[in-house]
Image: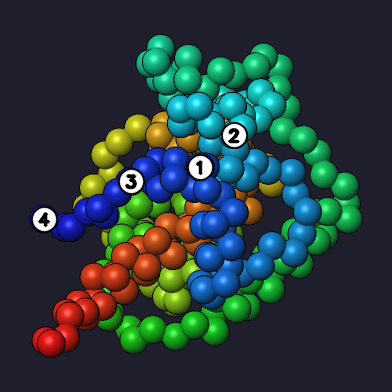
Amino acid sequence: MTPSPPHGPLHFLADVAIHPARHYTSQTDNAAGPSNQYSMSSPTVASLHISCGKDASSLSSPEPIPLKRSNSSNRFDTETRSSLRRKKNHKTPSYSSKARLQLKNRRKELMEKAMKIRSLDNSPVNSRQFIVLRMVYDEITMYPSESWMVLMAIIIRRAFKQVKNWFSNERQKNRSGKVIPVETGEGDKVRLRPLAIQAFQEWSDKLFEEVVMIHNYKVLRNSRQEDAPMDFPHAQ
């Protein structure tokens, strides 16, 4: 039996939604990860629609743009359908040729950065890497796109090839769970878990990067707190 993360992403995303500035500032200051250098239309972590008491109104955002479903989309239950609040006749926004070129160049740079990361062949992932990868697999997607695997490799400091192999091996062992084919903000076709779509209506490279960076930071912070020695009062 494999260990599971102490909290699912909805747990920490709800906390981030309450204190987005505190969490994301700490993350960008402490974790080594790719920077967002291109401007693409996508929701942010703080746009999560979770009721948080009297302060929930301050977190509300305009009605989210629903995902464009492919023709091969699985059927899902009424509860999930209701939670998505889809609009009819939605089309994925088209980007200018300049924006597409920026995206292509950024992905190329990130791939080059990921390919420079070296890990020992056949070496197991450490506990932090496992928790992050497990969270993505169980609650976002078991079929991450190449660009998302590149982002994970950079954030958790694991060779791109090994991240790719990890997901392939997990799918061979356990391919259970519903997935919904959708298009990301960049137009990539991915298969997401219903839980991921309930959390955010439209996914993109930028949003995926933010979610994984924050989760990686939280796991790292918790592990440091657990490893920190306890301070005992000095005897008088």
Which residue does the numbered mark 3 point to in the structure image?
8
Looking at the picture, the colour scheme in use is rainbow
Seen at 16% across and 86% down, the residue is 234
Callout in the foreground (3, 1): 1
Check residue 18 in the rendering and tell me which mark sits there, or answer none. 1
Check residue 59 in the rendering and tell me which mark sits there, or answer none. 2
> Is 149 located above or below residue 115 in the figure?
above
Q: Earlier in the sequence, mark 2 or mark 4?
A: 4
Q: Report whether 142 appears left or right of 201.
A: left
Mark 1 vs mark 4, CA separation in Å:
34 Å
Residue 35, picture quadrant: bottom right
Circles 1 and 2: CB atoms closer than 8 Å: yes
Check residue 192 in the rendering and tell me which mark sits there, or answer none. none
Q: Earlier in the sequence, mark 3 or mark 1?
A: 3
Tag 1 secondary structure: helix
Mark 3 vs mark 1, CA separation in Å:
16 Å
Q: Amino acid at mark 1?
A: Ile
Check residue 1 in the rendering and tell me which mark sits there, or answer none. 4
Seen at 44% across and 45% down, the residue is 15
Q: Earlier in the sequence, mark 1 or mark 2?
A: 1
Callout in the foreground (4, 3): 3
In this view, the residue in front, 16 or 79, is 16
Q: Amino acid at mark 3?
A: Gly
Callout in the foreground (2, 4): 2
In the rendered image, the quadrant that contains the N terminus is bottom left
Q: Amino acid at mark 4?
A: Met
Which percent across, then down, holds residue 144?
Answer: 47, 52
